[in-house]
Amino acid sequence: MEKRKILVTGSNGQLGSDIRELATQYPGFDFLFTDRETLSITDEAAINTFFNEKQPDFCINCAAYTAVDKAEDAAEFDKVKALNADAVGYLAKACATHHTKLIQVSTDYVFDGTGTEPYKETDTTQPVSVYGNTKLRGEELAAEHTNAVIVRTAWVYSTFGKNFVKTMMRLMAEKPQISVVSDQYGTPTYAADLAAAIMHIISSGKWEPGIYHYTNEGRINWHEFALAIRDIMQSQCEVKAIPTIQYPTPAKRPAWSVLDKTKIKETYQLEIPDWRTSLEVCMGKMQ
């Protein structure tokens, strides 16, 4: 029996790298890992050529412009829109033509962050940043052209790439004191857990198109996240809590990013680890 093929775009990023780590556990699939050098997803002709040649059964789009603050620079807008929105449309159209199932990875930034209850997939979207706006447009294009599964996530970290956990570990090793905002709430997501959830969806044999939310379980603020990192490191660094107003950034951050995961758990019978458990696993690999 011929193996089914999974195209993974943006495979050098955090999520793509964790899917690569998992690939050996799925011998029934052939993985086609691509990056901007091997497949430019902002080039519609290149996508069509790739799909014609490889005929993937699934496409996991991990590629995105994620420099949230840099995205606010007007000079960057075309790049952000090309990768986060237009490219998703190209992929979705190719998926529709070739009967490829698309998983599009999205973000909590599609919301304005003024909520007080965990956001459901049906809640009104209202991005307050260029990044959030372009990612929302990507969602719309994915759903417009094919029966995509769209997975929104938040606060992603990993043993790969740059992320909050690695930054905190470095700063706590270098400085006696740091300050971290304490009035932005959400849930960290270990990229390896998200990768496992995506592979669970693909290998389940069940395809229910639509939007899903996935993070680890729990609810904390960034200061509490930093304290947990410090505890696991057994660092003596003092971690001060500060309000967002004392840490201005070009892009506005959602003050509330907690996502309701009921739909993905019930639809795909997923068990989601607690954020602290997964943080300990990830940091255990890095220490």
Image (cartoon, rainbow, N blue to C red):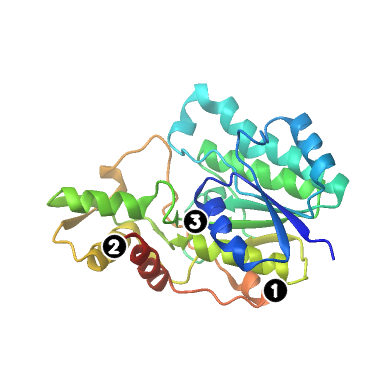
- The quadrant holding residue 196 is bottom right
| Residue shown at the point (49%, 51%) measured from the top left | 14
Q: Amino acid at mark 1?
A: Thr
| Residue shown at the point (49%, 56%) measured from the top left | 154
Choose between 9 and 186: the one closer to the eye.
9
Q: Quadrant of the N terminus?
A: bottom right
Choose between 141 and 38: the one closer to the eye.
38
Q: Amino acid at mark 3?
A: Ala
Location of residue 186 with respect to 44 vertically, above or below? below
Does the CB distance between marks 1 and 2 fall below 8 Å? no
Q: Position of residue 109 (x, y in %)?
A: 52, 49
Estimate how packed mark 1 is, as few (under 14), some (14 to 19) or many (20 or more) residues with alpha carbons within 10 Å: few
SS of the residue under disc 3: loop
Question: Comparing marks 3 and 2, which lies closer to the viewer?
Answer: 2
Label 2 belongs to which residue?
229
Location of residue 97 with respect to 256 vertically, above or below? above
Label 3 belongs to which residue?
154
Label 1 belongs to which residue?
267
| Residue shown at the point (57%, 63%) measured from the top left | 22
Does the CB distance between marks 3 and 2 fall below 8 Å? no
